[in-house]
Every structure is written in C-alpha cells, then in structure tokens.
Image (cartoon, rainbow, N blue to C red):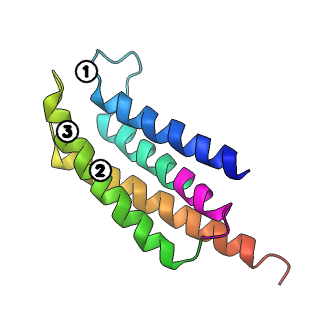
Amino acid sequence: MRLLSAILLVLVWSGAFLATHLPKMPSVVPSSDKTLHFLGFMVLAGVLGLFLAVRRQFAFRWLAAMLAVLAVYAAFDELTQMLVPNRHADWRDWVADMNGAAIGTALVGGLWWAWSNRGK
C-alpha cells in the first residue's frame, strides 16, 4: 500500500502540473475554471493525506503542514503558468486552489479521526 500511495501521489501531482502547464485548449467539457482548480486541489490534498496515512506518519499536526505545502505549490503553479502560451496567473485561481485544498484537508482529517476512533 505504501508503494501504491506513492505512485498515486506522483501520478496525480504530475498530472495536475502537466494539465496546468500545457497551452490552453478549448474545453470539451463545459465547466468553470475555478471548479476545476477546486476539485484538483481537493483531490491532491486527499492523495497527499493517503500518502502520509499509510506510512503511519499522519497526525493532526500534519494538516497545517499539508495546507502550507499546497499553498506554496498553488502559488508556484499559478506563477509558472505565465511562462506557457495562452496561460496566465490569476489570484482567483489560487483562492479556488486553496478552498479545494482546505476542504480536502478537512476531509482527510475527518476520515483520519473516524478511522483512529473506530470501535471506541
């Protein structure tokens, strides 16, 4: 499970990076750009939480660290998009990223709490 969680984290994170650093193409699925940012970072927070949990290194203090790492990555992601044709940095995208990361982190914390208190 440790290896699978590491592979999943690498695939999801690199997939997210590639998706935001390819030149913008017309969308085939009608959706809000902010919704995609929100969902992407919610999933990324979940996969990062899983990665930590299967190593038994997860603790509630890690929730703040997860949010900090995702905040820095979201800013890096937005700023480096300026280097890609037809892309630009948008602080509102960063806010959507952080909202998704916060909800994902809260879900991870809730699931971890429920798992650690099962049977009590």
Q: Amino acid at mark 1?
A: Lys
Residue for point 74% across, 50% down: 1
Picture quarter with the C terminus: bottom right
Q: Position of residue 84 (x, y in %)?
A: 18, 26
Give whichever of discs 1 and 2 has the lower sequence position: 1
State the residue in front, 10 or 100.
Answer: 10
On residue 90, the disc is none
Does 77 appear above or below 106?
Answer: above
Q: Amino acid at mark 3?
A: Thr
On residue 80, the disc is 3
Secondary structure type for disc 2: helix
Q: CA distance from mark 1 to mark 2?
A: 18 Å
Say if the magenta span includes residue 52: yes
Highlighted range, magenta: 47-57
Q: CA distance from mark 3 to mark 1?
A: 14 Å
Say if the magenta span includes residue 50: yes
Q: Residues within 10 Å of mark 1 (few under 14, many from 20)?
A: few
Residue 25 horizontal side relative to residue 6, left or right = left
What main secondary structure does the magenta stretch of the protein show? helix
Does 50 appear above or below 106?
Answer: above
Residue 18 horizontal side relative to residue 104, left or right = left
Does 4 appear above or below 33?
Answer: below
For the view shown, which residue lies furthest in the bottom direction? 120
Q: Residues within 10 Å of mark 3 (few under 14, many from 20)?
A: some
Q: Amino acid at mark 2?
A: Ala
- Determine which residue is flagged by label 2: 74
Q: CA distance from mark 2 to mark 3?
A: 10 Å
